[in-house]
Amino acid sequence: MLARLGTQAVNFAAGPPKLLARSPYRMSVNQIQPTEIPDAASEAPTTITQAVARALTIVDTSPLTEQQELQTLRQIITTWREVETDVSTLNAEIREKKKRQKALEEMVLRIMKKHNIGALDLKGSGGRLLCHRKTTKAALNPKVLTGLLATHLKSETAAAEAIKYIGEHRESRVYEKLVYEKN
């Protein structure tokens, strides 16, 4: 398994080299020596809170030397993978529960509309269920924008030029994210 550190990569086959920006070397995470931090497999977390708490104990905020950073990298990556796995499992559960919630909500709304009920008082919780209506605007994708601008400007070419200008001059933001890729 190879690891890339931002724009730099390190190969530990011939011992730990110095980290240089844009280094052509690659680093195998399996070749990083662990520190005194307890093994992640020996203390498997049962909840996401425990995993995060353990991850925070591994990630020390005090300044580390380059060698210490590389020694703790293996544990940090292992803990990050555990947390990522837990998050994806919990997200799958959330998706299933949201599907169920939406189906139940549609059933309740259908019954309330059918019987012309605006609100239901819930005796158990002391709350109320309200049928709330909200109007939203459609998304502004290029097809919709072109149609609206062509109608307003009374010219297809002027609308296309306006869309081109907007596309070229829109603000863009760069986000960096760590992604795990399975072999």
Image (cartoon, rainbow, N blue to C red):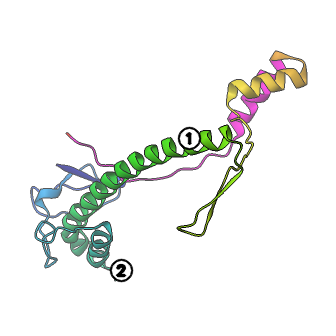
Does the image show residue 18? no
Does the image show residue 62? yes
Q: Say if mark 1 contacts mark 2, CB within 8 Å.
A: no
User: Which residue corresponds to the image point at 12% horizontal and 57% vertical from the top-left?
Assistant: 30
For residue 39, above or below residue 181:
below
Residue on which the image places disc 1:
106
Q: Could you tell me how far apart the alpha carbons at marks 1 and 2 are, in whole angstroms? A: 48 Å
Residue 108 location, quadrant: top right
For residue 55, above or below residue 91:
below
Q: Residues within 10 Å of mark 2 (few under 14, many from 20)?
A: few
User: Which residue corresponds to the image point at 23% horizontal and 42% vertical from the top-left?
Assistant: 182
> As drawn, is 120 to the left or to the right of 11?
right
User: Which residue corresponds to the image point at 23% horizontal and 66% vertical from the top-left?
Assistant: 73
Residue type at mark 2 is Thr
For this orientation, the residue located farthest to the top is: 156
Relative image position of residue 38 (x, y in whole percent)? 14, 76
Given residues 80 and 118, the one toward you in this image is 118
Residue 12 location, quadrant: bottom left
Res. 21 mark: none
Given residues 57 and 30, the one toward you in this image is 57
Query: Going from the N terminus, do you reach mark 1 or mark 2 first?
Result: 2
Over which residues does the magenta segment extend? Answer: 157-182
Res. 61 mark: 2
